[in-house]
Amino acid sequence: MKLFIFKTDIQTKNQLDQLKSVIQKQAEVSRWTIDMEDVDHVLKVETKVDAHEAEMLQTLRARGIGCEQLPD
């Protein structure tokens, strides 16, 4: 299992819905949360397998979700 922590640019309900759609299509994701109260709108993604962070970032960015890695 692996935990990824990202700073995102999610601001609106529509963007949050888009994020949900993208994350739910990822078979390796077992759990995820986003803290909309945090200034960085921190997204935490827990995977079932040892997924690659670069692939997760690429998938999110390809859907127009701005994000960058934050240290654990």
Image (cartoon, rainbow, N blue to C red):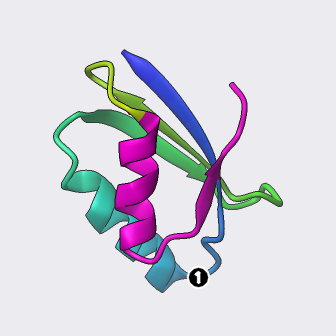
Q: Is residue 48 above or below residue 59?
A: above
The answer to whether 49 is drawn above or below residue 46 in the figure is above
Residue depicted at 28% across the width and 66% down the height: 21
Task: Determine crowd level at label 1: few under 14, some 14-19, many 20+ residues with C-alpha closer than 10 A.
Answer: few
The answer to whether residue 11 is above or below residue 5 is below
Counting every numbered tag in the picture gives 1
Residue 52: percent from left, percent from top: 38, 32
Query: Percent position (x, y) of residue 67?
Result: 59, 60
Q: Residue at x 39, y 47 (%)?
A: 56
In the rendering, at what x and y percent does residue 44 appear? 54, 40
- Amino acid of disc 1: Thr
Would you say 21 lies left or right of 64 here?
left
Image quadrant holding the C terminus, namely: top right
Left or right for 72, reference 29: right
Name the foreground residue: 13 vs 29.
29
**Residue 60 falls within the magenta-colored stretch:** yes
- Tell me: residue 55, above or below residue 58: above
Magenta segment boundaries in residue numbering: 53-72
At x 65%, y 70%, the residue is 9
- Name the residue at the top extreme: 1
Q: Which residue is mark 1?
A: 12
Specify the quadrant of the image occupied by residue 69.
top right
Residue at point 36%, 15% (across, down): 1
Instruction: Report x, y in % for residue 7.
Output: 68, 53
> For this view, does 14 lie left or right of residue 41?
left
Considering depth in this image, is 61 or 41 the residue closer to the camera? 61
Q: Secondary structure at mark 1?
A: loop
